[in-house]
Each structure stands twice: as C-alpha cells, then as structure tokens.
Image (tube, grey):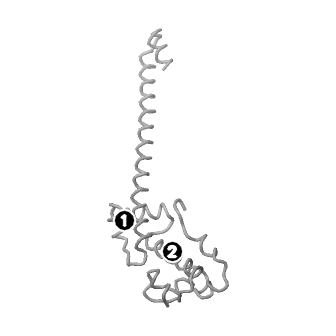
C-alpha cells in the first residue's frame, strides 16, 4: 500500500504500470484468501456430513447398514460419500462398520460373560460362526482366545479414526 501511495504521489516514469502491477498483486492475494476460506468451509461441511453417518453407524451398527443409506443421510452420492469416508477414516464405509462391530465385540468379550452367540447378535452378526471367522481374521485370535488370554488392547490400535 505504501508503494502504491508513493507511486501515485511522485508519478515517476511508468508509474501507471507499477500501480497496475500492485493492484493485480493485491487482487491475487485477496482471491487466494477467498479460495482458502471457501476450501476450509467446504472441509467443515464435509466433516459434518460424514459425522452424521458416523453417528448413524454408532446407533444402528447392530442392524444391516448399506452405503446408500449412509450416503443419503450425508446428502451425498454413494461414490462421493465413499470417497470422502475413505479419505477421512482410511477405510471404506462397510470396512469401517465391520471394524466397529469387531470393536464392540472386543468390549463385550472383555466386560461381560455373554456367550459368543449372544455377543454376535448384539454386534450385528447373524451367524456366530461368521463372527468367529471375521474376528480371527481381523484380531488374530478367536473370540474365545481373546476373552481368555489376550491383552485387551490387541485390537484397539487397529481401529481407524479421522485422518488415518
């Protein structure tokens, strides 16, 4: 701004070109700032939409949940929702739901004496054998082994969170 005032005051040779350049530079800085603010607002809006889906998962994880349901809740197309979810959590939505269910199984195995069949039902698995297969694949041990002799934190570090 000081340079602009100086050029207007002294009107040295080519001062009009210098003033034009300074104005162009200032406009570019303003445009850059506006773009940055719009990008930040868009990121916050995405987070809020994805957060709605996360809240739905935490409430209804026991039920069958489709990606299209979550996309609708988030007011996004299925492909856009899946991409943003993956970008935020490092997993696709159905992978996250599976991890969330397994995490809940771990909590119930640590804190209750419920049977594996009962835990399977509480965590959204219709078939306890399927739960056992998936649990062993994801955690590395069967639900029974997890309950009896495994450190309870063995799986917790594998649950993704925002930004992972």
Residue 160 location (% of width, % of height): 54, 67
Which residue shows up at 58% across the image and 79% down it?
111
Residue ID for mark 2:
99
Question: Marks 2 and 1: CB-CB under 8 Å?
Answer: no
Q: Is tag 2's residue or tag 1's residue first in the polypeptide sequence?
A: 1
Quadrant occupied by the C terminus:
bottom right
Q: Quadrant of residue 75?
A: bottom left
Residue 69 location (% of width, % of height): 34, 70
Which residue shows up at 43% across the image and 51% down it?
44
Label 1 environment density (alpha carbons within 10 Å; few <14, some 14–19, many ≥20): few
| Vertical side of 144 occupied by 101: above or below | above
Residue 132 location (% of width, % of height): 53, 87
Q: Nearer the viewer, residue 7 or 66?
A: 66
Which residue shows up at 42% across the image and 65% down it?
55
Q: Which mark is residue 164?
A: none
Say which of marks 2 and 1 sits in front.
2
Q: Calculate the distance from the C-alpha at mark 2 to the C-alpha at mark 1.
A: 21 Å
| Vertical side of 77 occupied by 42: above or below | above
Residue 80 location (% of width, % of height): 37, 62
Give the secondary structure at mark 1: helix
Q: Nearer the viewer, residue 7 or 151?
A: 151
Q: Quadrant of residue 66?
A: bottom left
- Describe residue 69's horizontal placement relative to residue 109 as left or right: left
Q: Nearer the viewer, residue 21 or 120?
A: 120
| Vertical side of 125 occupied by 46: above or below | above
| Vertical side of 107 occupied by 89: above or below | above
Residue ID for mark 1:
79
């Amino acid at each position: 701004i000081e340079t602009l005032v100086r050029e207007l005051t002294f009107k040295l040779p080519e001062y009009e070109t210098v003033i034009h350049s300074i104005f162009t530079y200032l406009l570019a800085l303003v445009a850059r700032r506006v773009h940055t603010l719009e990008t930040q607002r868009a990121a916050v809006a995405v987070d809020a939409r994805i957060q709605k889906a996360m809240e739905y998962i935490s409430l209804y994880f026991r039920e069958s949940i489709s990606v299209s349901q979550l996309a609708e809740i988030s007011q996004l197309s299925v492909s856009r929702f899946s991409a943003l979810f993956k970008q935020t959590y490092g997993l696709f939505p159905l992978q996250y739901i599976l991890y969330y269910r397994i995490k809940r199984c771990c909590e119930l195995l640590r804190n209750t004496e419920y049977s594996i069949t009962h835990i399977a039902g509480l965590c959204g698995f219709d078939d306890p054998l399927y739960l056992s297969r998936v649990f062993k694949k994801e955690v590395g041990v069967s639900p029974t082994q997890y309950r009896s002799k495994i450190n309870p934190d063995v799986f917790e570090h594998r649950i993704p969170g925002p930004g992972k």
